[in-house]
Image: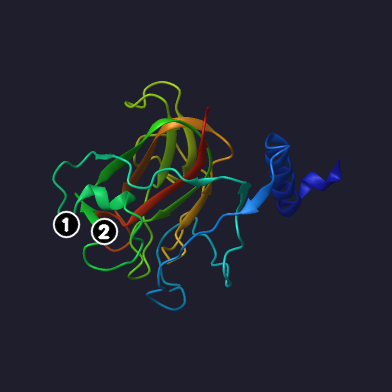
Amino acid sequence: MNFLKTPGTLFAGVLLLFHLNVLGQEMVPLDIDLPQPMFIGTPQDFDVPNLEKPLGKPRPSFMAPEGTANVSLNKYVESSDNNPIIGKIEVITDGDKEAVDGSFVELAPGKQHITIDLEKKHTLYAIFLWHYHLEARVYRDVIVQVSDDPDFIMGVTTLYNNDHDNSSGMGVGEDLHYVETHEGKLIDARGVEGRYVRFYSNGNSYDRVNHYIEAAVYGKPIP
């Protein structure tokens, strides 16, 4: 099976396995309402290792089973920082993705996390994350996990980890750093099941604080 030897065909193989997992369900593009772009182009002077290259064109639509919806909209959010520097934690799931005053929360410097309670177990297909896209920034140690345990001690699935040097102490990640844009970061949830979704970060390329505009988790409730 030589088709697995190149990155492109390997990705195609992963997609094929995902589609086999949802066999029998009609796949449709997710309808994502994107915010206004706030800057043009991607600065190239970031001193950040393992930086994802810009796509240079709009991101292709993400295909998910019909009926997949934003199951995190207006859901309860907890934070490791109980007293944000700016804003309120609940804006993270209010559906407003614009990079304007009142639409984001600023958390304390260093490693911080927020956790969304989906209220019941869901099958998850995609997660979109906007930290702060008013200007081009790279957020460090972005880690996304799913669990049925609100304390994330047991049954934890890590969907994304770009902590290349284990500076957050949660293991070395192999995912790439990326520049914030109005499209947000798309993370393939690969049909994982869980009730709680947790997001970590550890400062950014501009300063040590952490920001969140919106986190949107797309899935379907498990009957």
Considering depth in this image, is 49 or 40 the residue closer to the camera? Answer: 40
Position of 45 compared to 213: left or right?
Answer: right
Q: Of the residues under marks 1 and 2, which one precedes in the sequence?
A: 1
CA separation in Å, label 1 and label 2 = 8 Å
Number of numbered discs overlaid on the protein picture:
2
- Residue 104, which numbered label? 2
Q: Quadrant of residue 213?
A: bottom left
Q: Mark 1, residues whose alpha carbon is within 10 Å: few (<14), some, or many (≥20)?
A: some
Specify how the rendered protein is coloured.
rainbow
Q: Residue at x 23, y 38 (%)?
A: 80
Q: Amino acid at mark 1?
A: Ile
Position of 68 compared to 120: left or right?
Answer: right
Secondary element at tag 2? loop
Considering depth in this image, is 118 or 201 the residue closer to the camera? Answer: 118
Q: Residue at x 36, y 22 (%)?
A: 153
| Picture layout, residue 85 above or below residue 132 | above
Secondary element at tag 1? loop
Considering depth in this image, is 177 or 149 the residue closer to the camera? Answer: 149
Q: Residue at x 45, y 72 (%)?
A: 44
Q: Residue at x 61, y 62 (%)?
A: 60
Q: Can the viewer see residue 91 in this picture?
A: yes
Q: Amino acid at mark 2?
A: Phe
Residue 156 image position (x, y, % from top left): 44, 27
- Residue 86, which numbered label? 1
Q: Quadrant of residue 102?
A: bottom left
Position of 94 compared to 55: left or right?
Answer: left
State if disc 2 and disc 1 touch (CB < 8 Å).
Answer: yes
Residue 67 image position (x, y, % from top left): 57, 45
Q: Quadrant of residue 56?
A: bottom right
